[in-house]
Image (tube, rainbow, N blue to C red):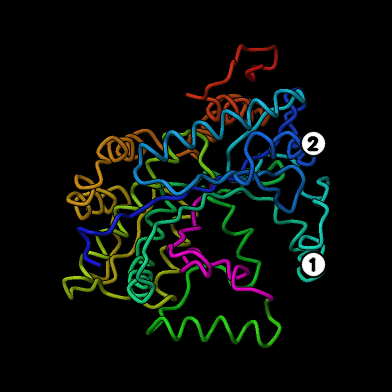
Amino acid sequence: MSSKEHRFTLGIEEEFAIVDPETRELRSHIQEILEGGKVVLKEQIKPEMHQSVVELGTEICDSIEHAREHVIDLRSKLASLAGKAGLKIASVGTHPFSHWRDQLITEGERYKEIVKDMQLLARANLIFGLHVHIGIPNREAAIHVMNQARYFLPHIYALSVNSPFWVGHDTGLKGYRLKVFERFPRTGIPDAFESLSEYEDFCKLLVKTGCIDNPKKIWWDIRLHPFFDTLEVRVCDAQTRVDDTLAIAALIQAIIAKLFKLLAQNITFRVYRRRLLDENRWRAARYGIDGKLIDFGKETEVEMRSLLGELLEFVSTEVHELRTQREMAHIERIMREGTGADRQLEVFHRTNDMKAVVDQIVAETYEGLHVAAPENGSGIPA
């Protein structure tokens, strides 16, 4: 299938925190929301391991505008469901101060098995991510695109950092969520695979030897989905604003489209070893867009914003073809004004109040939604 014939469909999964608008703490309330949600949202709403976390997933979207409609609609319906229980939703990489030990685990055999296997690591894994699926029916080509796309994961993460706080502490990192999650096995940037068969053999070996019961328990920052014909980028923190979610999803789509097109022309981007990419991954988590990444070809540090400018130029043709200029303009806005982590830190440094940070997160989560949001005394939309 040529790049012109291929449509790089989108699927977006967002994980949300359920928040008490008075205390601003997480609230273990997923069972009650699911009861109403299964009627309104059907299979697009899913529980997560902690009862204070809920996941929404769009349908397969043909365009970024289609995806935008879905994301806004799903968020609006979830916000309405939470509102009926006197609660709010918040989209953020980590809750600024709620402690994982206070959260209830969702009932069900799947979560019981994860806790049995991972023990304290599972209970402490109170994080919220953004996962973006890009359709690629040719799985052999998708493996080679995945190998090359690994290079851009630190760039993408730097734009998405939205987790500077952990259990009431300023971590000093812009993206602490990745540091929590990488305590799990089978996480981080994967090694490169020579072929689809090598990838499939690896998955089969893990299942055969009892390491996992299915390949969905491979939680890399990017993976060829074991059941769907998609490349799934899992590195991003959950984004507070709808516009941030769509912009980052569109950038991922453009990168995958570019690399697929180059592959079809027998042009390949250089594949770097994981140990080198991990250095940039660390820098992205620590500094976000205010830091520097290593240009391994030139063997020098380069300002993150400069690299992002080069990346936007690299995918400019694909952006035009995919009609995502609006989303790339928003990427440039993030580069100018800062990430979700930068906005959280600004509120905290100004107020010295973690509750004010939660208020800011909730207010931004509700921006552009189809749900009534008058202000109450807490500053959180009622």
Q: Position of residue 9 (x, y in %)?
A: 37, 52
Q: Position of residue 275 (x, y in %)?
A: 44, 76
Left or right: where 189 falls relative to 112: left
Q: Is residue 218 magenta?
A: yes
Choose top left, top right, bottom left or bottom right for residue 80.
Answer: top right
Three-letter residue code for mark 1: Glu
Callout 1: 10 Å neighbours few (<14), some, many (20+)?
few
The residue indicated by pointer 1 is 113
Q: Nearer the viewer, residue 29 or 41?
A: 41
Callout 2: 10 Å neighbours few (<14), some, many (20+)?
few
Three-letter residue code for mark 2: Glu
Find residue 333 and name its label.
none
Q: Nearer the viewer, residue 62 or 95?
A: 62
Q: Is residue 198 above or below residue 306?
A: below
Q: Position of residue 346 (x, y in %)?
A: 51, 31
What residue appears at the point 47 percent right and 24 percent down from the top-left corner? 368
What residue appears at the point 36 percent right and 77 percent down from the top-left corner? 140
What residue appears at the point 27 percent right and 59 percent down from the top-left corner? 6
Q: Is residue 371 magenta?
A: no
Find residue 32 and name its label.
2
Q: Position of residue 85 (x, y in %)?
A: 77, 25
Question: Regarding mark 1 in the picture, which secondary structure is present there?
Answer: helix
- Magenta residues span 213-237
Question: Regarding mark 2 in the picture, which secondary structure is present there?
Answer: helix
Left or right: where 167 falls relative to 351: right
Q: Is residue 24 above or below residue 299?
A: above
Does the residue at mark 1 contact the one at mark 2 (Cβ under 8 Å)? no
Q: Nearer the viewer, residue 351 or 10?
A: 10
Q: Is residue 56 above or below residue 6?
A: above
Distance between the Cα atoms at labels 1 and 2?
23 Å
Question: Which is nearer the N-term, disc 1 or disc 2?
Answer: 2
